[in-house]
Amino acid sequence: MINKETVLIVDDEKEISDLIEIYLKNDGYSVLKASNGLEAIKILEENEVHLIILDIMMPKMDGIQTCMKIREEKNMPIIMLSAKSQDIDKIIGLSTGADDYVTKPFNPLELMARVKSQLRRYTRLNTPKPSKKDEIEIGNISINVATHEVFVDGKEVKLTPKEFDILELLARNKGIVFSTQKIFESVWKEDYYESDNTVMVHIRKIREKIELDPRKPQYIKTVWGVGYKFES
């Protein structure tokens, strides 16, 4: 399994750093390493990092100082490592901005489980939600303009680009009647010819895909002598 996430290990004990690296790479993560806080800060300035495993006891800049410095600008998960197991040490570590605290010696598999848990949480909280303007929901139909997806009763239906554009135009302007000419010129961006039945054909295909009974449409209504409108 290959993951896109990069994990930065910050620990001056090479044996521990190398051990963690082996487990991370076996799980498909990219790995960067630093032996002190100053190196870690420099790496973060030059690379995209998704999670940090940070030892507390280090030379030059310890884990507490490093964590505080990182938190001035970045919000990726930080798991602290420490040989100290007192509650006060955990409290200090977490209060400086760490998300989790693991005491040495540790079980590498437990550490990997915590890495995955923190990354899932971080990814979920930082995944952009679709803008409301990109989502149209009417009845049992859901239209995602950003991804060009249409769902009916939660099941995706496949529309051609022109079919999608017509559906979006009508759904975004629910209740407004659009003439065949207006639909054609809005979607195709070309001059309309009276004898052109292109729009009618596309409307029929859309109905076949989204309507329970295309012969008695619930959503795309025909306004005789005028055009079409979308109703809920």
Image: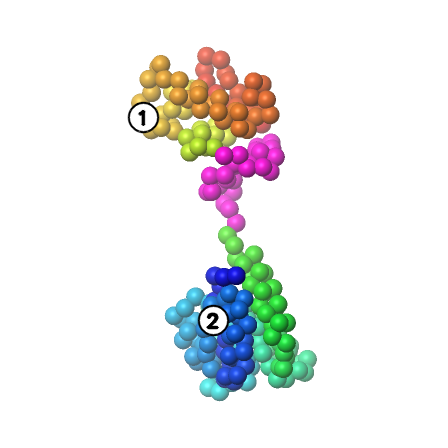
Residue at 47% across, 23% down: 203
Q: Which numbered disc flags the more N-terminal residue, 1 or 2?
A: 2
Task: From this view, report whether residue 143 is shown above or below residue 25.
Answer: above
The residue sitting at the bottom extreme is 59
Image quadrant containing the C terminus: top right
Q: Please give the residue where the numbered disc 1 appears in the rendered image.
A: 190
Highlighted range, magenta: 129-158
Which of 212 and 47 lies nearest the eye of the viewer? 212
Is residue 176 at all visible to an observer of this figure?
Answer: no
Q: Where is residue 125 in the image (x, y as percent from the top left)?
A: 56, 57
Which of 109 and 83 lies nearest the eye of the viewer? 109
- The answer to which quarter of the image holds residue 115 is bottom right
Task: From this view, report whether residue 83 is shown above or below residue 100.
Answer: below
Q: Which of marks 1 and 2 is in front?
A: 2
Task: From this view, report whether residue 31 is shown above or below residue 163.
Answer: below
Residue at 58% across, 18% down: 216
Residue at 46% across, 39% down: 148
SS label for mark 2: strand
